[in-house]
Image (cartoon, grey):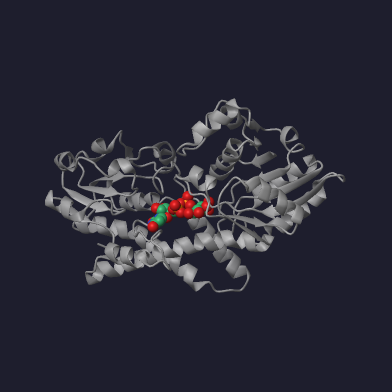
Amino acid sequence: MKITFIGHGYVGLVTASVFADLGNTVWVIGHTKEKIENLKKGVIPIYEPGLEGIVKRNIKAKRILFTLDHKEAIPESSAVFIAVGTPPRENGEADLSSIFEVTKKLAPYLSGYTVVATKSTVPVGTNKKIKEIINQFKSQKADFDVASVPEFLREGQAISDTQSPDRVIIGTDSKKAEDLLIELHEPIGGKHILTTIETAEMIKYASNAFLATKISFANSIASLSEITGADGVGVLEAVGIDKRIGSSFLSPGAGFGGSCLPKDIKALLGIAKTSGYDFGLLKEVNKVNDQAIKGIVNKSKRLLDGNLENKTIAVLGLSFKPDTDDMRDAPSIVIINSLVKAGAKIKAYDPVAMKNAEKILKRITFSKDCYQAVEGADLLILLTEWNEFRQLDLVKIKKLMKKPNIVDGRNIYDPKKVKDLGFAYIGVGR
Ligand code: UGA
């Protein structure tokens, strides 16, 4: 099948590559000349494990093609996927301006029958507006249907999530569009959920909101365990074994971040507000997350006798989670800014996110590796559980540090082992 993706971020580029890899001819439309020229050479604008290899392989096979020109791609495509960002506005609502802008641009080039499907996370009612815009700007002869096909991939595991999803949501009111999308998704596993556009739009928000709720629940149990003396991590592991609950997304830590959970919760709260529904539970999820992030600063103070002034703190991990260079809404930003405000000097290291972090965190020093970061430090804070941090030479680290203090924001170290080596250690919920 010939298809087009508009947008080449984590969702657009990954999904386009996976469909190209399955034998389809996939056009990717961007709007920045430099990025498109780079993509044509296989230089990708984001860090995602395995993505560059797939892109290069499919460029060679001429199955993935990059362009700035709608005319090259849209007319011959059976389906056009909109995969542009929907960042939060100041009031939390999703900013849909890019969605409507690209819709206006693509509409005049539709030719024959095309399914215009939205992959971006959009509030209920957006696809209806997309339909109205297309009707306004398309040529008279062009025939089309809209569909909501939300994406559930996680950064860092985006390729495998796209290749074998748990479910594929196809929301449309047209049988013809449904059949075409089923055919396109046939080689991909997962249960097909055939539903209305509105339900599909809401499924995406509900899924992310539930994941965030699980994490905040875990962080609440962790906080309560710290106070009562229970082992919060052990509690949550045991709780997660119950099949009705499930063990994933129950790890307490430095809070959730990224370009999706925080944004989608804000947007869903906005949808609830406009609908006159008080979504108190979700407000609380956000509050608990703020506390989890601030909790790392409080723990740091505790280890440094309440005074961060002129203390040197090594921060390991900056991205919002491992295996990504994405710094959007990373808990590290809030934590570092608050440590700096309290007078601490930060030496940070992250395996891939430092280039992006440099644009955001201006008042800190970046180190070439973990060992350089901890040199002379009064405290080490672990914020992202990159694999390379799991088996550090802690004996060497202790020698390099001024004071052997660790705040383990992702619970990756064995408290007993670390304490036996002479460190003062605080994790989350243990
Ligand atoms: C999330 C969803 O998991 C995807 O299904 C969805 O497609 C995506 O948003 C999206 O809307 O595009 P992502 O933001 O890439 O994916 O990352 P997650 O793996 O969900 O992690 C989000 C945050 O939660 C991270 O900061 C992570 O450290 C934190 N987290 C996760 C915890 O604190 N504890 C956990 O147990 C799990």
- Identify the residue at the far right of this view: 140
**In the rendered image of this protein, does residue 112 appear above or below residue 190?**
above
Quadrant of res 352: top left
Count the labels in the image. 0
How far across and how far down the image is residue 35, in percent?
58, 32
How far across and how far down the image is residue 334, in percent?
39, 53
* Residue ID at (32%, 38%): 365
Query: With 342 as the anchor, is 7 left or right in this view?
Result: right
How far across and how far down the image is residue 427, in percent?
25, 57
Residue 265 seen anywhere in this rendered image of the structure: no
Quadrant of res 38: top right
Residue 335 seen anywhere in this rendered image of the structure: yes
Q: Quadrant of the N terminus?
A: top right
- Which is more toward the observer, 122 or 301? 122
* Residue ID at (33%, 51%): 341
Query: With 181 as the anchor, is 151 left or right in this view?
Result: left
Q: Quadrant of the C terminus?
A: bottom left
* Residue ID at (27%, 53%): 408
- Which is more toward the observer, 210 or 68? 210
**In the rendered image of this protein, does residue 394 appear above or below residue 300?**
above
How far across and how far down the image is residue 43, in percent?
52, 29
Query: With 106 as the anchor, is 142 left or right in this view?
Result: right
Query: With 77 as the anchor, is 364 left or right in this view?
Result: left
